[in-house]
Image (spheres, grey):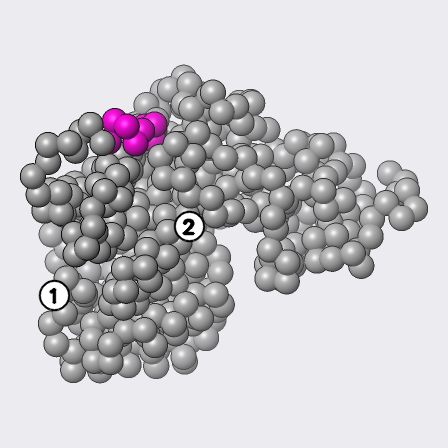
Amino acid sequence: MGQQPNELTPEAGPWHHWGYELRQFRQARRLSQQAVARKALIDRAHLGRFERAERPVPRHAAIVLDDVLDTAGALVRRWDRAEREDPQDGPVPVSRAETATHGANTRSHGASGLETLAVSTFGEAGSLGDETVVVPARIHGRILFVPVPRRVVLASGLAGLAAAAIPAATTAAAATELADMGSPFEHFAQLRRMMIQTDNLIGPRHMLPALQQHLVSLATRRRAARGVDAVELLTLETRYEELAGWFAQDIGDERTAHGHTAKALDASHIAGDADLTAYILGRKAQLAVDTGHPADALGLAAAARRTARPGSRLEVIAVLHEAHAHAVLGEGRDAHRAYDTALTLLGRAGADGVWGSWLDTAYINTARARSLAALGEYEQAAAGFDSAIAVLPPSYRRDRGVYLARAARAHAGTGNMTLAAQIGGQAVGIAAETGSARIFVQLDRLDQALAPAAGEDGVAEFRASLDRIILHPA
């Protein structure tokens, strides 16, 4: 256990300091690297490199290590601080899907962490010749999304989770496909509308590969166009990129989600469409808060509001993202003030065509219910979700699963574990059908909340049904 002199240099930078703190916590617990690696399901060599700041530290790895070493969130908070001070830029595994299909090269530390966990848990998964899919897996008691070889998923019997293989589209094939197309804009616009509708019924695992194929074809046609046609196709391509980011987030692939959304923002600026830029800034705010960066989300939401036309529904959308970021940060007064502002702005806003046509008072109240849950105000949150579920159209299958899972977590927060388990069981079925990470994230939180009440009616059944639809380490 003896530490070599000068082996660690915490003064060299934020990540060296993080590695030093990791070792300090490990040694304080009298644990060897091997023991921690075994508990965390992280390769021992990777753990050593984390301590020496020789390898980028994924946030998911920081979360697991924080849990294993019982640091009460210290390692995660210090990871966030180090990331702000010095974003990592080390070698990150790139999947064949990303390089072949959409070319996103934005680095996301969650992605490399998922690779690390997948390799240590399910065997060697990093080979570019072995197609991987991102799936929910039980890692050290929590549900995390990890890239796993398709063959492992199929062997597990969870064939539905293996559906999101991303096809390797080629520019030549796309050009051939589009050679005789008469009206490419309307063709691709109609495809996008169809995919949005289908996604809510069956989830993104089937839709993302198809969308990415169409995105390659659309980009090929846009590059060949000129003048007004080129601008119109670029605007549509921007919306395809944003939708691909949404789908990727909903299968738990944060890296691909960030990549597509970043490309959408760049394209919106090139197209010169301020409305589109405002909308995508809002999406980036939403993605930031959902991936654990609420402070960043506040800045993005403020930028979205500055960019949006005053009095537009896009301004309302920006304020809603700001409100939830405040709630996640524990700033209840600011969150409620922002929701009240959103309701006031909505009352004054006119029709913006496609932008925010779905916004109404009920939608804002449902969004507020999510924030109430984040603030620990579970009774009001449960009432809000129950009301939303009662009026949700049957075609919104995936959204129903999200609302059910959030309602169940809120009811657990009120102490009604039996009702929470019953509602959660309904959400499990939809999670299995759609593969939605938004549902799985809530079910993981519900699972943790119900764990102390294992003897109450329905709790054991819920937890068993959840375990049946996720992968488990061999």
Which residue, given by chain and number where applicable, does mark 1 sit on?
353
Q: Which residue is the extreme one toward the left?
A: 182
Looking at the rendering, the stretch of residues picked out in magenta corresponds to 165-174
The percent position of residue 174, horizontal first and vertical second, equals 24, 31
- Image side of residue 437 versus residue 430, left or right: right
Is residue 256 shown above or below 151? below
Disc 1 marks a residue whose amino acid type is Gly
222 horizontally vs 290: left or right: left
Q: Dot 2 corresponds to which residue?
A: 258
Q: Quadrant of residue 81?
A: bottom right
Label 2 crowd bin: few (<14), some (14–19), many (20+), radius 10 Å: many
Going by the numbered disc 2, the residue's amino acid type is: His
Q: Is residue 93 left or right of residue 373?
A: right
Residue 190: x %, y % from top left:
11, 45
The residues tagged by marks 1 and 2 sit, at their Cα atoms, a distance apart of 27 Å
Helix, strand or loop: magenta stretch: loop
State the residue in front, 73 or 170: 170
Q: Position of residue 41 (x, y in %)?
A: 61, 33
- The residue at the point 44 percent across, 29 percent down is 96
Note whether 345 is above or below 231 in the view shown. below
Which residue occupies 78% across, 37% down? 32
